[in-house]
Amino acid sequence: MNTGLIVLIVLAVVLVAAIVALIILGKRAQKKQAEQQVQLDAMKQTVTMLIIDKKRMKLKDAGLPQAVMDQTPKLLRGSKLPILKVRVGNRVMSLICDEKIFDSVPTKKEVKASVSGIYVTEVKGLHGKAQAPEQKKSFFKNLVAKAQEKAGAKMVK
């Protein structure tokens, strides 16, 4: 047999094994996420809060309790999380926000939020209109807008 054919067969077997392993790991991760979502829904409470500030910051800089830091895996401690600084009643605290809703959370507004522990899962506006998140422009659209501004400024002169 040709050695190139043998190498090709070995590579195909390795690729198939890697794909099967990724499928199995993906299914396990989905099951774990579904279980965690059920737990979050079971512990959910609706709270009225004033959102003071929102930022993406490292876990150690967020001002979360030490117990949270101890339970977090070491690899994730340096990653940035969406953090909300809120006032509930007369207490000011930091909460972790769900990534899906972080951009639509209004600042300096009073809202009703679904909270599970220190995790904010849903926010509804209490007073006034809900603020729509700003759509970020793509690189190309941003470039075109700058070019049009400069062209408009030259025309005025």
Image: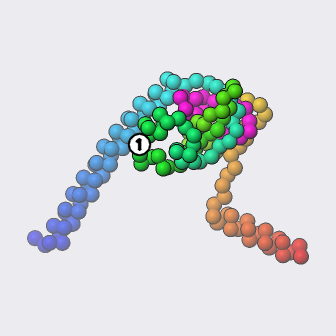
Residue ID at (53%, 35%): 65
Q: How crowded is mark 1: few (under 14 residues within 10 Å), some or many (20 or more)?
A: few
Residue 106 among those drawn in magenta: yes
Horizontally, residue 57 falls left or right of residue 68, namely: right
Q: Position of residue 99 (x, y in %)?
A: 56, 43
Q: Residue at x 49, y 49 (%)?
A: 79
Q: Which of 157 and 1 is in front in this view?
A: 157
Residue 2, visible in the rendered structure:
yes
| Residue hosting label 1 | 73
Q: In this view, does 75 lie above or below 149?
A: above
Question: Most extreme residue toward the right, as rendered?
Answer: 157
Instruction: Give the farthest residue toward the left.
Output: 1
Give the residues drawn in magenta, as a range: 105-125
* Residue at image location 73% in from the left, 68% down from the top: 146
Percent coordinates x, y for residue 155 in the rendering? 86, 75
Q: How many labels does the image show?
A: 1
Q: Is residue 11 magenta?
A: no
| Left/right of residue 26 with respect to residue 87 in the rendered view | left
> Residue 144: image x %, image y %?
70, 68
Determine whether, in the image, residue 92 is placed left or right of residue 152: left
Place residue 132 in its image quadrant: top right
**What residue lies at 41% left-to-right and 30% top-to-bottom?**
35
Three-letter code for the amino acid on which mark 1 is drawn: Pro
Majority secondary structure of the magenta segment? Answer: strand
**Where's the N terminus, which quadrant?**
bottom left
Image quadrant for the C terminus? bottom right
Judge whether 140 appears above or below 104 on screen. below
x, y percent for residue 60: 52, 45
| Residue 116: quadrant of the picture | top right
Q: Can residue 125 be seen in this view?
A: no
